[in-house]
C-alpha cells in the first residue's frame, strides 16, 4: 500500500528518480518502553531473596529510583518492566562504577 502511494506521488509530481523501498515494517517497539517508570507496577522486593545475576550468580540490589536490579560487581542494571525483572543479559545496561576517591587527611 505504501509502495503504491509512493509510486503514485512520484508519477504525479514528475520525479525523475525513485527510491524503491522493500518491505516497510513498523519498528518493534513495545508501548511499555514509552511509559514512565512511575506508572509501572511495583516490584516485589521479597523476590530479591531468590533472584541472582544470571552471569555472576551473585545477589542483586533493587534500585527504586530507576526501577532496576543492580549487580554492583559487574556494573550491570537489569530493567524491571511492569513489576517483572528482565534478567536477559543482552537487555541489561552497563552502569558506571566510579572509582573510590581517596580521602586525604587535612
Image (cartoon, grey):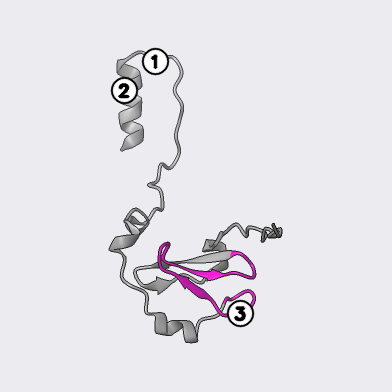
Mark 3 or 2, nearer chain start: 2
Residue 93 locus on image (x, y percent): 54, 59
- Label 3 or label 2, whichever lies nearer to me, is 3
User: Can you identify the residue that label 3 sits on?
Assistant: 58
Whole-number angstrom distance, CA of label 3 to CA of label 2: 58 Å
Q: Position of residue 52 (x, y in %)?
A: 55, 80
Residue at 31%, 24% in the rendered image: 8
Q: Is residue 77 left or right of residue 100?
A: left
* Number of on-image labels: 3
- Label 1 SS: loop
- Which residue is label 1 attached to? 15
Circle on res. 28: none
Residue 54: quarter of image: bottom right
The magenta region covers 53-75
Residue at position x 34%, y 18% in the image: 11
First of labels 2, 1 by sequence position: 2
How many angstroms separate mark 3 from mark 1 (CA)? 61 Å
- In the displayed structure image, the side of residue 8 where residue 102 appears, left or right: right
Q: Earlier in the sequence, mark 3 or mark 1?
A: 1
Amino acid at each position: 500500500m505504501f509502495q503504491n502511494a509512493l509510486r503514485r506521488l512520484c508519477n504525479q509530481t514528475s520525479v525523475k528518480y525513485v527510491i524503491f523501498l522493500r518491505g516497510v515494517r513498523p519498528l518493534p517497539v513495545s508501548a511499555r518502553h514509552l511509559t514512565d517508570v512511575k506508572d509501572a507496577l511495583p516490584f516485589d522486593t521479597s523476590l530479591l531473596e531468590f533472584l541472582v545475576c544470571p552471569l555472576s550468580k551473585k545477589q542483586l540490589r533493587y534500585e527504586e529510583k530507576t526501577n532496576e536490579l543492580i549487580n554492583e560487581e559487574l556494573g550491570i542494571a537489569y530493567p524491571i518492566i511492569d513489576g517483572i525483572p528482565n534478567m536477559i543479559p543482552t537487555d541489561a545496561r552497563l552502569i558506571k562504577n566510579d572509582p573510590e576517591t581517596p580521602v586525604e587527611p587535612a
